[in-house]
Amino acid sequence: MANNPSAEDSLIARYFKPLATDPGAFGLVDDAAVLAASGDDIVVTTDAIVEGVHYLATDPPDTVARKALRVNLSDLAAKGAAPAGFVLTLALRSKDDSWLRPFADSLGEDARTFACPLLGGDTVSTPGPQMISITAFGRVPKGRMVGRTGARPGDRILVTGTIGDAALGLDVLTGGTAARALTSDPVARDALVSRYRIPQPRNAVAQAVRDHASAAMDVSDGLAGDLTKLCAASSVSATVDVTRVPLSAAAAGLIGRNVSCVETLLAGGDDYEVLCTVPPAQCDALIAAGQAAGVAVTIIGTIVAGHERPRFLDGQGQELVLKRLSYSHF
């Protein structure tokens, strides 16, 4: 995981060697790992989370660890891939045991839960914001990865879970309107904050996505913007019935009280749900597979021919003009 034979090796041995359970990790004593061949295609994805951008400096280290791994697991789920392992890069300001111990313990718990062992990586020091970068590897049967380019007119648009909770959770943590509105409802507050801090990657439905979806991606930057990206990749357009977009009870309550608006939920990032397109004849099978796995799957619209941006329609069939489609890093 590193070449420095002193403090860095000690840090790695203390916190991360116990996570490297795959034989190909060589106990982290080498500067490379082996991912055993199996005849499957290897899916590779990478995401970094940066303090102050993707998580708050006050977020507990255990939730930071889970988020760092789970955002990558979410990508694998949307590709129909089973997790195989990951490599980790940490940019740290200090070797603080009170931060590193719960971080490493929670990372190890998730690595076991999702059968995605640590294979290696690097640790560096930084004077700036902390950064955690993970590259995750998954396996799919040869030629079966679900990309963004397969959506066809007539396909239905489906999404797992609920949309917009993470954006509201961030609003709660930063003292926004949602925080003020939920002062007397700690259950709703905690539920929204948890959705921001700890994504729920939908790996339980990865095989069903692989078996039934024509195109898929995870919702990381906002449903509206991510659907726009998928449609552009497939050279199609879409119509979405906003009244069918699944909302949690907390989010629906805030909408009903005019504390938040639909645009905030459609354009908010960090949902980490699976967005996919499915031929009509296969929708029931994917929805049933989700039910069996305890994951709600909802039809929210239809793919149509054309190259226009997707249209988002209200309950009266009128188009909503969204000022913002998604979170932008730049």
Image (tube, helix red, strand yellow):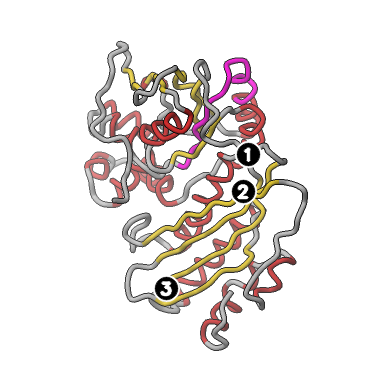
Amino acid at the residue labelled 2: Val
Depth order, front residue of 24/16: 24
Identify residue for label 1: 145
SS at circle 2: strand
**Residue type at numbered disc 3:** Leu
Q: Is residue 134 above or below residue 329?
A: below
Q: Where is residue 87 in the image (x, y as percent from the top left)?
A: 58, 63
Q: Nearer the viewer, residue 50 or 114?
A: 50
Q: Where is residue 143 in the image (x, y as percent from the top left)?
A: 68, 38
Mark 3 or mark 2: name the one nearer the start of the chain. Answer: 2
Q: What span is in magenta?
A: 272-286
Q: Which residue is drawn at 45% across and 74% down?
A: 98
Residue for badge 3: 92
Q: In which quarter of the image is the N terminus?
A: bottom right
Residue 279: within the magenta? yes
Amino acid type at circle 1 is Met
**Residue 234, placed above or below residue 89:** above
Give the residue at x 43% y 48%: 194
Callouts 1 and 3 close, C-beta under 8 Å: no
66 left or right of 323? right
Mark 3 or 2, which is nearer the eye?
Answer: 2
Which residue is under mark 2? 43
Q: What element carries label 1?
A: loop
Q: Residue at x 25, y 28 (%)?
A: 257
Q: Is residue 2 left or right of residue 232?
A: right
Question: Contact, CB < 8 Å: mark 1 with mark 2?
Answer: yes
In screen coordinates, is 126 left or right of 233?
left
Of callouts 1 and 3, the N-terminal one? 3
Upstream in sequence: badge 1 or badge 2: 2
